[in-house]
């Protein structure tokens, strides 16, 4: 497996413009000859499909939901960063770049991160032009808020539903292209495999979720915008349908999978109430701007929070990190929450919870101001827990939220499988070992609106359009394999529902590959997962047939892939024998319990190569170089 | 808690459906309505019966995928709440609960409680956008927008496209959905160039999809999980009248490429 990142020459602030100057392009008259498949309609997929179609390419776009508007980007609450420096508080492209690099704990590719920071401002311009109703100040100009891990106010927002508004913007552009015939939209259609022939990506095999029909689509290039794999934990903030199937199938067909162990655990989710729970609901991180996080100083203090006097409250983030206080990066906040709960100071029925308190903010800034900022989040919390956060502190606990790992891509966002591109959360490229708050939407839209539509031309222009059609035997071969997998699930003689195995896998991963990891736990997970996989295939029951709308079959197929992927994730966590960002190995911490990187041995991207079922994968490395921002230990304390 | 569920079962669009009774027991009050259905489905699967098909995805009230008419009300008895955020503590122990799909001819049943809402997407494609390509754009601060106007636009665009308004309306009208998108874009300066053409196209598409007409019952607003105001329907009607009576017709077809 070749790992050439294709990073352009020149100083870091000129790499992208130099690259554009020398990219091979496809001319407007030739673009309609090329067919491009985009899988997924979140911020990355919708923006890419719309942009490509507007340029003249013929686009086929797929999503498993009933409408492209429902992709999980819609649930992003807090906001989107851009280095506009509207607040005149010292922001710049360099500062956004360095915040992202430091937040990612120096495990991201510098050139990509710089490009992301550079494009951030154009995203706001693009979205506003589409009619995204960003929050405005009294004078009519755009408002900003601050977000975890940074010292400037650069986050743009639409109440607590920035994701929905940005996605509706991207989706409106997509709707226009569907109407004009540039995009053919395939809803309720799930990718089940990638078709590869002569080392290049030729198309995909899909299942129509309503009729059950399995079919293939040929294309000159395939773009995966299929999101992350956090549902490997069963309980996460992801939507129920989010899955690893597309990226995992691509991996098994030859695409390198990078840094699978890098998963962000979000510090502010509503704690689980019990075994029946189907997902964890996130409370936007923006709440940390005004909420103060604390636990009772005494272990097992059962008093209601209002009865606990000030001196018996442990504002542990403010005490431990005086400079950033409640705005420390997500991994630091998550680990500290687990730490105080493990020490017996946790609150709520399970003891896995900490308070997020708005009492002081309401007192100092007024109830109206706080209501305007967080009203809908307060309502959401109240609906779920039946507690009113205006009167009693919220209870929060960390939840798996975002996967920084994903398919390895070069500077052009192409995977190691020629013709297969990965954008948004599905790739690994910009967030290193931890993602800065309000940066996920930025990356999705930078990839979809501004990067991929240009870089894909560089690949397409090297190949004639429409080289092979879905009549080619490679498609039949792949379809046969897909049909066999589907029948194997349906014909299985077991008796247990899929959910039972999903919960078991989630527990293994949460315990052994979650907020903190260690070698012995990972070794035991690597024993348990194959056993669980065997039991799954022996004992699962998938009711119904493949010829109708069958949600059990969908879920079983996704879990079967998670059961394979989980092993790679643990293998990567074990292999990366250092702590960095969200990847906290108990064996590697400072005296104060912070992550301890090992730059001498691990300043690289781990890229895994599949060697066949039952064979150990090979770990390749892309070395990381740091020129614009020299390596430094993170320090959020002083 | 225990419940008797009367659930609409229908194998596919072409077959007749009927209400079938299913019992669930040992349900915690902190279980969400959909988690309760998850548990029912696990039990059905274990006993070799077909699980109940229903749509859901984000399970945090924003994707608009979940639906269900519960005891005759879209998204159930709680105001401003999607089914996925409805909790069993709001029901009486031992209650009988009737669960049906969205009831509208324009939303054909796919299976059991799952319906086809693609008519909504077609209304959006008819004009629910501002025509801009990806690429360099003016700085948004060059076009100041009164925050009251921006907030009003957001009040409209907060619609999650779930279809509850249609299911709630005795006429099966999609006016609130269409009004929300038309209002969002017509309020903003960026939406002005296509303002009148947009409303005509979207209303025409809405009517051709077979949705009913608005008679101001107000059930759409009452059952909307995002509490979208019926005032937007008034705005839609004003926009439509202006577009058809006062303003000149669309010139797009007369534009010639250079």
Image (cartoon, coloured by chain):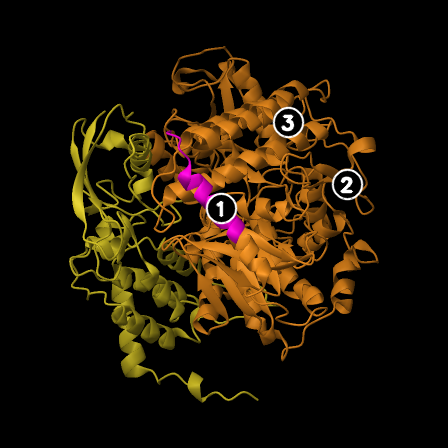
Chain colours: A orange, B yellow
Q: Are marks 3 and 2 in contact (CB under 8 Å)?
A: no
Q: Which residues are magenta?
A: A480-495
Cα gap from disc 2 to disc 1, whole angstroms: 34 Å
Viewer-nearest residue: A480 or A436: A480
- Between tags 1 and 3, which lies in front? 1
Locate residue A591, reporting x and y percent.
72, 18
Dot placed on the residue nearer the N-terminal end, 3 or 2? 3
For disc 3, the marked residue is A322
Q: Are marks 1 and 3 on the same chain?
A: yes
Quadrant hosting residue B257: bottom right
The residue at the point 75 percent across, 29 percent down is A597
Viewer-nearest residue: A98 or B105: B105
For disc 1, the marked residue is A484
Viewer-nearest residue: B233 or A1: A1
Badge 3 crowding class, 10 Å Cα cut-off, few under 14, some 14 to 19, many 20 or more, is some
Tell me if I can see residue B189 in this picture. no
The quarter of the picture where the C terminus of chain A appears is top right
Tell me if I can see residue A226 in this picture. yes
Say what secondary structure mark 1 lies in.
helix
Say what secondary structure mark 2 lies in.
strand
Q: Is A315 within the magenta?
A: no
Cα gap from disc 3 to disc 2, whole angstroms: 37 Å
Badge 2 crowding class, 10 Å Cα cut-off, few under 14, some 14 to 19, many 20 or more, is some
Locate residue A240, reporting x and y percent.
43, 41
Locate residue A193, reporting x and y percent.
55, 51
The residue at the point 32 percent across, 37 percent down is B34
When the figure is inspected, residue B105 is found, relative to residue A269, above or below; the finding is below
The residue at the point 48 percent across, 35 percent down is A236
For disc 2, the marked residue is A621
């Amino acid at each position: 497996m070749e790992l050439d990142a294709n990073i352009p020459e020149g100083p870091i602030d000129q790499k992208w413009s130099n690259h554009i100057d020398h990219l091979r392009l496809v001319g407007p008259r030739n673009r309609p000859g090329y067919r491009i498949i985009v899988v997924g309609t979140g911020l990355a997929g919708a923006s890419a499909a719309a942009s490509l179609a507007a340029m003249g390419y013929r686009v086929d776009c797929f999503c498993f939901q009933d409408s492209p508007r429902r992709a999980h980007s819609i649930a992003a609450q807090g906001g989107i960063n851009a280095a506009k420096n509207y607040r005149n508080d010292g922001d710049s492209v360099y500062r956004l770049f360095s915040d992202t690099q430091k937040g990612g704990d120096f495990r991201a590719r510098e050139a990509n991160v710089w490009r992301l920071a550079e494009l951030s401002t154009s995203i706001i311009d693009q979205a506003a032009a589409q009619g995204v109703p960003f929050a405005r100040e009294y004078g009519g100009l755009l408002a900003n808020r601050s977000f975890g891990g940074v010292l400037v106010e650069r986050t743009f927002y639409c109440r607590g539903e920035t994701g929905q508004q940005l996605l509706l913007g991207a989706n409106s552009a997509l709707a226009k292209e569907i109407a004009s015939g540039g995009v053919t939209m395939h809803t309720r259609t799930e990718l089940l495999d990638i078709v590869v022939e002569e080392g290049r990506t030729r198309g995909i095999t899909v299942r129509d979720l309503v009729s059950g029909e399995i079919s293939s689509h040929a294309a000159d290039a395939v773009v995966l915008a299929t999101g992350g794999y956090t549902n490997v934990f069963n309980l996460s903030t992801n939507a129920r349908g989010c899955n690893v199937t597309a990226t995992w199938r691509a991996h098994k067909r030859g695409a390198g999978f990078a840094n699978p162990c890098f998963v962000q655990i979000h510090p502010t989710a509503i704690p689980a109430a019990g075994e029946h729970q189907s997902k964890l609901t996130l409370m936007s991180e923006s709440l940390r701007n005004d909420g103060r996080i604390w636990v009772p100083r005494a272990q097992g203090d059962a008093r209601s929070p209002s009865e606990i006097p000030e001196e018996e409250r442990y504002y542990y983030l403010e005490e431990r990190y005086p400079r950033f206080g409640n705005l420390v990066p997500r991994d630091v906040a998550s680990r500290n929450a687990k730490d105080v709960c493990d020490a017996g100071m946790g609150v709520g029925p399970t003891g896995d919870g900490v308070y997020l308190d708005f009492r002081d903010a309401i007192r100092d800034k007024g109830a109206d101001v706080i209501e305007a900022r967080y009203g809908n989040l307060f309502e959401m919390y109240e609906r779920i827990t039946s507690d009113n956060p205006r009167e009693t502190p919220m209870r929060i606990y960390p939840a798996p939220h975002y996967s920084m790992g994903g398919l390895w891509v070069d500077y052009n966002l192409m995977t190691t499988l020629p013709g297969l591109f990965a954008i948004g959360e599905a790739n690994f490229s910009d967030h290193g070992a931890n993602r800065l708050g309000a940066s996920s939407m930025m990356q999705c839209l930078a990839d979809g609106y501004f990067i991929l539509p240009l870089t894909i031309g560089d690949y397409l222009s090297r190949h004639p359009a429409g080289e092979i059609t879905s009549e080619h035997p490679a498609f039949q071969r792949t379809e046969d394999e897909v049909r066999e997998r589907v029948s194997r699930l349906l014909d299985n003689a077991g008796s247990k529902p899929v959910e039972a195995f999903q919960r078991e896998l989630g527990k293994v991963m949460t315990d052994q590959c979650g907020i903190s990891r260690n070698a012995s736990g990972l070794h035991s997970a690597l024993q348990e997962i194959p056993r669980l996989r065997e039991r799954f295939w022996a004992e699962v029951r998938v009711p119904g047939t493949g010829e109708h709308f069958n949600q059990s079959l969908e879920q079983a197929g996704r879990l079967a892939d998670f059961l394979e992927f989980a092993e790679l994730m643990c293998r990567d966590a074990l292999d990366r024998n250092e702590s960095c960002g969200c990847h906290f190995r108990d064996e590697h911490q400072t005296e104060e319990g912070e992550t301890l990187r090992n730059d001498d041995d691990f300043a690289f991207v781990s890229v895994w190569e599949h060697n066949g079922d039952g064979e150990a994968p090979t770990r390749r490395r892309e070395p990381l170089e740091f020129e614009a921002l020299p390596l430094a230990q993170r320090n959020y304390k002083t | 808690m225990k419940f008797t569920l009367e659930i609409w079962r229908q194998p596919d669009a072409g077959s007749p459906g009927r209400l079938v009774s299913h019992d669930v027991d040992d349900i915690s009050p902190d279980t969400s309505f959909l988690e309760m259905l998850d548990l029912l489905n696990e039990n059905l699967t274990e006993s070799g019966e077909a699980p109940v098909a229903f749509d859901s995805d984000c399970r945090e009230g924003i994707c608009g995928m979940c639906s269900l008419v519960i005891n005759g009300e879209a998204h159930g008895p709680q105001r401003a709440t999607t089914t996925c955020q409805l909790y069993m503590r709001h029901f009486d122990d031992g209650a009988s609960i009737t669960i049906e799909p969205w009831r509208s001819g324009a939303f054909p049943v796919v299976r059991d409680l799952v319906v086809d809402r693609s008519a909504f997407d077609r209304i959006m494609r008819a004009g629910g956008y501002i025509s801009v390509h990806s690429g360099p754009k003016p700085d948004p601060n060059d076009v100041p927008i009164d925050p009251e106007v921006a907030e009003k636009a957001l009040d409209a665009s907060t619609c999650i496209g779930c279809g509850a308004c249609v299911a709630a309306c005795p006429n099966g009208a999609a006016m609130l959905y269409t009004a929300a998108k038309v209002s969002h874009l017509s309020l903003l300066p960026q939406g002005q160039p296509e303002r009148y053409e947009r409303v005509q196209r979207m209303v025409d598409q809405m009517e051709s999809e077979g949705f009913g007409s608005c008679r101001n019952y107000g059930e759409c607003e009452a059952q909307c999980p995002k509490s979208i105001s019926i005032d937007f329907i008034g705005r839609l009607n004003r926009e439509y009248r202006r577009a058809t009576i006062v303003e000149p017709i669309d010139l797009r077809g007369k534009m010639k490429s250079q």
